Structures are given as structure tokens and as C-alpha cells.
Image (cartoon, grey):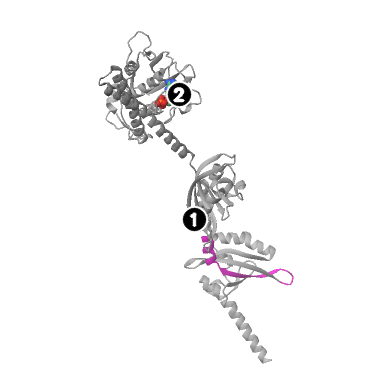
Amino acid sequence: MSGAAVNDDLLKESLLELYEEAPCGYLFTSPDGTLLRVNQTFLAWTGYTRAELVPSRRFQDLLTVPGRIFYENQYAPLLRMQGFVNEVTFDIVRPGKEPLPVLVNSVQRPDAAGHPVFVASTVFDATARRSYERELLRERREAERLASIVDASGDAILSASADGVVQTWNTGAARLFGYAAAEAVGRALRDVLAVAGDARAWRTIEEELRDGRPVHVETVGVHASGEQIDVSASLTPHLGSLGELSGISSIVRDIRERRALERQQQEFLAMASHELRSPLAAIKGHAQLMRRHARYSEGGVDTIMAQVDHLDRLVNDLLLASQIAAGRLSLRLAAIDLAAEAHTAAAAHVRPDAPPIRVQASAEPNEPAAPVLVLADQLRLRQVLSNLLTNAVKYSPDGGEIVVRVSQGDATATVEVEDQGTGIAPEALPHLFDRFYRVRATAGTAQGFGLGLYITRQLVEAMDGTIAVQSVVGRGSTFTVTLPRAPFPAQLGKTSGTQRAGSDTLGIRRTQ
Ligand code: ADP
């Protein structure tokens, strides 16, 4: 019937149109890749004319070099072997334009005997997909970068569901709490943060979080070993699309050191007011006595003077310690005779009621001491010697001799202050030079701020020296200070006027 023929033609025409104008490229190639037929869409995308492609070019010749290599070595063999290949991306080189990323599916058509006759391929424009993939990759990299920052952080960073079940746990958290991530995930937040287990406190926190406000708390962290750790925790709410609390992230920081420092400062304030008050009370008492009797007593004035000296030393120590802490200590370095300074300091500490002090500053006992020149700040060096001698006297309640020994090596000179006093317990030795440190056993009996040795070490180190201690309880202690020897005066002259390191780790200014 002619009607059917017309319809057939129409159908063929429509099919052809569909083929030519399809939203994808259609290619027919011989098994070796030679292009036999391409549709209009493919031509429009690539910019080639039909005559440029068919039948002179091979599909693989349209690809970038890596694509061609891949086609020859992987794609074509796979196609021959399994008869089809799906979803492979290639870049098609275009005249005068950027290569076009495409996604290719190919099917091999065999003849009745099973020999391949041609290959039919569909080609999809993968530009959008490629940029989407690129975006995805970029986001993945960014996420990985953030994850590595989180992981490398010294703070514990963790997240939990809205009902307080731990979901993520970084290395810092593992370090702080002693649980590996695998042990911590799934655990209740209250197992590790005391505040999460305190129903009332947690309700208030939750209310804030539900309102979208971050919360900062100082609480106790519970280590896997059961040890309690002072921590600060910042809790950040994560809200879902309906504004509901969907999760919490938290940064937890170990604040034990800060807490210890706060406690130390409180103890120091209490002790300082006590230490300052007792000499004041003595001064006031003697002054009142003198006023009441309307006459000066020699002993009273002596006590007042001694207490004022003591107060003066305490206040000076406080001032020096605060200067050191603020980095405002300045040094005037010069060539100073350590032997002479040792003699002067010893003489100043000799008292009838205190142990005798012997200075040993030369190889032969009766020879006059030869100068031992060190590069030091004279005032600070005097303070160092005075602090060590004051302690030696103070902690030798039963007498015994005190020996000050000066010696010199090639580059350094050393002064030792040795006493036969109470000695220092081995466990106290590592803390002796800490700020505010006082040995408990002596704290009640001898007066002091626990600043003397701290200041001493800071001064010695500021002068590029070192200080060490050896002690046996009940036998006595030896403090050894080593300082750099002064260069010959000519050398000293050369370097004088230069400002050595504007400030070092202590922030101590040095002038020479
Ligand atoms: P303080 O003002 O308490 O004397 P220091 O910093 O000078 O402070 O000394 C710290 C602690 O070291 C003292 O409390 C004391 O117990 C101990 N100490 C210092 N020197 C001696 C010493 N020569 N013999 C025994 N103990 C000492």
C-alpha cells in the first residue's frame, strides 16, 4: 500500500533526523577505528566537516596523545575481547578550540560468522561532568586538608550527635583522653567530659546550643586511666535544615598548667602577705614600745633596721622577679674579678651568730687571690653571691663551715658555695630554681618567698652562665655557678659598645 510506503519513508526520515540531531554523537567505525559514519551532533561539537573525517580519519586520531595511547592499549583490545566498552572518558582534539571531554560507549557488531564488521559508539559531552568532577575533587582535597589540620591540632577536637554520642575523635583527643578513635567513637560524651554528665549544667548548655549559640565551659576531663584533667571546652552547635540541633563539635584544651599557675599565684599572694606582714608587725611593735617609753632602745632600733633590711630584700626580690618575667632586666657586662667579689660577699655575710665563711680563691691557702676575670654585670653577680650565701647561712641552723671556692678553666670560671647545713631532699632538687618554689620542710621555719634561687638562676643564665646544685640531706649543699671568663681587655674594648642580642629568650637586654 502506498500509504504504508509513505509512512515508511516518513519513519526513515524521522529516524535519520533523530540520528543526526540526537543530543549525543553517533559514530560508526570499522574495527580498526576508521570513521565510516558520524552524525551531525558530533560534527557540531567537534567543528570538523564530514568530509574531513569520513572515511579518511580514525577515531583514535581525534584524541589527545594520552587518550590515543589508552585507546590502542586498553580500549580497542577490551572491545575486541568482550564486544563492548562502556563509560570511558576521552578528550577529542578540536580545530581552534579546547579539547572536548567526552564519555564514550562502544559496541562491536559481528557478522553471522562472528567476525567484527563495525563498531557503533555513542559519544556524550562530558564538559559538565568534568567540571563537576573537578569541583568534587577540589572539595575532597579541601576536606582532606581540613581533616589533616584537625588531626595535627594539639587540641582535642571531637564531634558528637545531638544526644551526646561521640562521632569523630582526632589524634589530640586520643592524646588528651587516652582513648584511640576506635574506642572513643560511640562512647557517651559524659564518659569523657564531666559537664556532660551533670544533668542540670548540661540542660543549660543544651538550651544555648539549641538556640544556635556556642558555649565555652571549664570542666573536668576524664582520662581512660580515670585521672581527672582540668580542661576548657568550646562547644559549637550544628543545626539541621529545620533549625534543630543535629550535632555538637568541641575543641577541648588541657588547662592543667594554667590551673597550677593560678594556684601557685594564689599561694604566693597568701605567702607574700604573710611574709611582708611579720617584719612590719615587728617594726610596729618596737616603734610603739619606743613611743610608749618615750625613749630609743638600742636593741629596738637594731631590730627595726634588721626588719627593714629584710623587707627591703623581699621587695627587691619581688621587683627583680617581675622585671625578669616582663623581660625588662638590663645587664651591663664588664670584666669583673670573681675572686674579689667572693671575698667581699663573704665578708658581708659574716655574723657572730652565723657559721664562719672561708673563701678559697687561690691554689695555695695563704697566697693572695689572683684576679679571676669573668664577663658579668657586677651588681647582678653580687646579688647571685649574696643569694647563695644568705641561703647557706639560713639553712645551716647548727653551724658548720661555709666555703666559697673560686677556680678557673680555659673559657669559664667557677664559684662554689658549699655549706654543711640541712641539705635538700632529692625530690626537691629538680624544682629548686622554679619560681615560688620552697621546700615544704623548711617553709615553716626559714623566711623567704621562694624567689631567691629562681632569680639567681635567671641572672646567671642572662650572663651566659650556668648554675647547678649537689646536696645530701643532713650533710649539706654545694651550689656551683659557672660564668664565661672575660676576654682580654683589648678584646673587650673591641666589642664594647655593641649591643649584644637585643633580647634573648628571657627578654633580658644586654649592654656591654
Ligand atoms: P627562699 O626564699 O625560700 O629561701 P630560695 O629560692 O632561695 O627561696 O630557695 C628555695 C628553697 O630551696 C628554700 O625554700 C630551701 O628549702 C631550699 N634551699 C635553698 N638553698 C638551700 C641551702 N643552701 N640548703 C638547704 N636548702 C636550701
Query: What's the distance in space between the residues labelled 2 and 1, CA to CA?
Result: 50 Å
Could you say where residue 287 lies in the image, as x and y percent from the top left?
A: 29, 24
Relative to 201, does residue 450 appear above or below in the rendering?
above
Q: Give the magenta part as a residue range.
A: 111-135
Horizontal arrangement in the rendering, residue 207 relative to residue 269 (left or right): right
Q: Amino acid at mark 2?
A: Thr
Ligand 1's quadrant: top left
- Compared to residue 140, the image places residue 127 above or below, namely below
| Residue on which the image places disc 1 | 208
Secondary structure under badge 1? Answer: helix
Q: Quadrant of the C terminus?
A: top left
Q: Amino acid at mark 1?
A: Glu
Image marks 2 and 1: residues in contact by CB distance under 8 Å: no
Q: Which mark is residue 442?
A: 2
Q: Give the left or right position of residue 179, taking residue 283 as reference.
A: right
The residue under the point 49% across, 17% down is 474
Which residue is more in the foreground, 93 or 480? 480
* 51 versus 285 height, above or below: below
Q: Percent position (x, y) of residue 5?
A: 66, 88
